[in-house]
Image: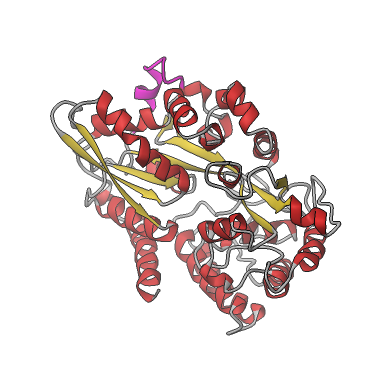
Amino acid sequence: MLGKKRAITLGAGLLVTAFAITGCTGAGGGGSASGDVTLTLATVNNPQMKDMEQLKGTFEEDNPGIKIDFVQMEEGDLRAAVTADVASGAGQYDIVTVGAYEVPQWGAQGWLTDLTADLADDPAYDVDDTLPAVRTALTVDGKQYAVPFYGESSILMYNKEMTDAAGITISDHPTWQEVETAAKALNTSDVAGICLRGKPGWGDLFAPLTTVVQTFGGAWYDEDWNAQVNSPEFVEGVNFYVNLLKEAGEPDPVSNSFTECLNQLQSGKVAMWYDASVAASILEDPATSAVAGKMGYAHAPVYKTEESGWLWSWNLAVPKTTKNADAATTFVKWATSKEYQQLVGTTLGWTRVPPGARTSTYSIPEYQKAAAAFAPITLDVMNSVNPKQPGLNPQPWVGIQYVTIPEFQDVGNQVAQLVADAIAGRTTVEEALDKGQVIAQTAGDKQK
């Protein structure tokens, strides 16, 4: 565990340092798809990425001479490794999986290959079919630096058999107070009422927690980049989250992020889960999920705002340092194409088609039928959230569960560790956020 935390800190530090160094914006970027090439792809170890690795043989058969070597990591480790690689210009990876947070910053810094022409010049790829909100987040000054593999918001997922047995009804637009009451009623010695991320990391614990803070009226910064981490609203939101975990959450939450909560919900160890909407496609896969057909879905819970879901996409990008840019771009287009979605549907099952990336996905009859339980609400939430102002007050950046400044990785990781200590009972929320305020303000001062 210590080694992982140190790696995350190193990655974030390199990002901050490299943004200040103009000499490491990358070299290379040429290359050709001809000849024998082995591409190294760094990716998060989510189920959809594992599906991509399982299906890569189809691409390799259609593109003789190109092989794909997958390197899968946990989310925090991936960010640290990829950040270190692109920031230093090491060129270890030919293709990287990056989030909506990183793409516009890295693109503007010159670390990623501009894919605009390659996408626009290929009518079969149909770049205009990608969801506009997601594509916009990947574009800087008219240049698109990545393509979405899947997009998501956050929703409440619950086991209907458990809620029905307890006589509990979850509304389509629940409040956090409603969820708290239900979680406590469903909590037993064998089943946790709710699973929430507690693993330290800005993309782990603070992905859902930031949305809770926002709907409670809090924010990382005000319009003038004054940190608000120990404001009453921020403290109230974090205390609510921590207390909900203590009173009705899963055991040892500081060890849990997306994958761990997914596994616990699938195995019947928890009744509810608030997390990424993409999880619904996994939960509804009858081939792998014991709860397929037993789940209910609702909008992200709220308190003082009308919506509180996040907006995120996992994307494929080509670092400027690769010597195989043409081959890498060929694979990136294949893995995010309509053809790939058809391949997933016919080979692995239609519930496993990557959601939230292409508009046409929601017009495929087989997908509409297989994903009827979750596809409409996923699209509804993604179109309802407001990344320009997700909370009660205006903010000087665009983004919901993250702040689009390079220092935020480090800030978020450090504050997440402090909050994880509070979840574990080693400190109080107030003490943790007082320390977090100092960390956040140092980064905020650089924006003034």
Query: Is residue 118 rendered magenta in the image?
Result: yes
Query: Is any part of residue 415 visible from this angle?
Result: no
Q: Position of residue 56 (x, y in %)?
A: 32, 35
Instruction: Give the farthest residue toward the left.
Output: 35
Task: Give 324 or 56, whichever is nearer the viewer.
Answer: 56
Residue at 35%, 61% (x, y): give it.
Answer: 11
Query: Is residue 258 rendered magenta in the image?
Result: no
Instruction: Give the farthest residue toward the right.
Output: 167
Q: Position of residue 341 (x, y in %)?
A: 47, 28
Task: Give 8 or 53, whichever is nearer the viewer.
Answer: 53
Q: Is residue 241 left or right of residue 27?
A: right
Give the colouring mode of the picture: secondary structure
Residue at 42%, 41% (x, y): give it.
Answer: 51
Establish if 40 lies above or below 361: below
Q: Position of residue 340 (x, y in %)?
A: 42, 28
Chief SS of the magenta region? loop
Task: Give 21 or 370, whichever is nearer the viewer.
Answer: 370
Please identify the quarter of the rendering in which residue 375 is found.
Answer: top right
- Quadrant into which the N terminus falls: bottom left
Instruction: Give the farthest residue toward the top.
Output: 123
Q: Position of residue 158 (x, y in %)?
A: 71, 53
Q: Which residues are magenta?
A: 114-126
Task: Give 331 or 85, whichever is nearer the viewer.
Answer: 331
Q: Is residue 339 left or right of residue 60?
A: right
Instruction: Give the farthest residue toward the bottom.
Output: 426
Residue at 31%, 57% (x, y): give it.
Answer: 84
Query: Is any part of residue 427 visible from this angle?
Result: yes
